[in-house]
Image (cartoon, rainbow, N blue to C red):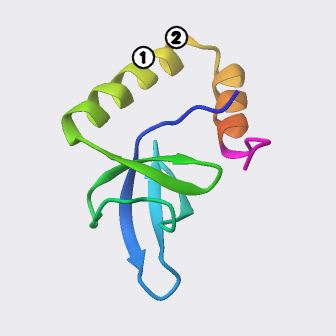
Amino acid sequence: MCLSIPSKIKSIDEESNSCTVDTMGVERSASLDLIDQDVKIGDYVLIHIGFAMNKIDEEDALESLKLYQQIIDKMEEEDAQEMIEEAQNCPNR
């Protein structure tokens, strides 16, 4: 299962039309080729298969992140790490 966790844009590379995002402390790259909204550093986006798909409201993003953190806090450490790794290595990516 792939989770679309809100990710905060940390930097934008205009030459490659990509960005670096922070997803709950994990940084990775995402393409901006499929997003039809203007984004800037500090915006929150949802990513699917390595592409930023939607820009989301900061308040909604922070509420979602809070709920994800509550779920992780209730999981055993091993299960939590497995969930994070699965999200990072989504087979559809």
Q: Which residues are magenta?
A: 88-93
Prevailing secondary structure class for the magenta stretch in the rendered image: loop
Q: Residue visible at 40% across and 48% down?
A: 54
Q: Please, what is the three-letter code of the amino acid marked with disc 1? A: Gln
Query: Which amino acid, by three-letter code, is at mark 2?
Result: Lys
Badge number at residue 2? none
Q: Which mark is residue 74?
A: 2
Quadrant in which the N terminus appears: top right
Q: Residues within 10 Å of mark 2 (few under 14, many from 20)?
A: few
Q: Pick whichever, 92 or 28, lies toward us.
A: 92
Q: Magenta includes 69? A: no
Q: Nearer the viewer, residue 65 or 91?
A: 91
The image quadrant that residue 76 belongs to is top right
Q: Residue at x 70, y 39 (%)?
A: 85
75 shown above or below 81: above
Indicate left or right for 66 with 89 as reference.
left
Cα distance in 3D space between marks 1 and 2? 6 Å
Residue 73 lies, with reference to residue 82, above or below; the image says above
- Where in the figure is residue 69, as x and y percent of width and height? 43, 24
View extreme (right): residue: 91
From this viewpoint, which residue is outermost toward the top?
Answer: 74
Residue 40 rendering spot, x and y as whole percentages: 27, 67
Q: Secondary structure at mark 1?
A: helix
> Does the magenta-highlighted stretch encompass residue 90?
yes
From this viewpoint, which residue is outermost toward the left?
59
Residue 65 point in image, percent of width and height:
37, 31
Q: Is residue 19 left or right of residue 64?
A: right
83 or 41: nearer the viewer: 41
Q: Which mark is residue 70?
A: 1
SS type, badge 2: helix
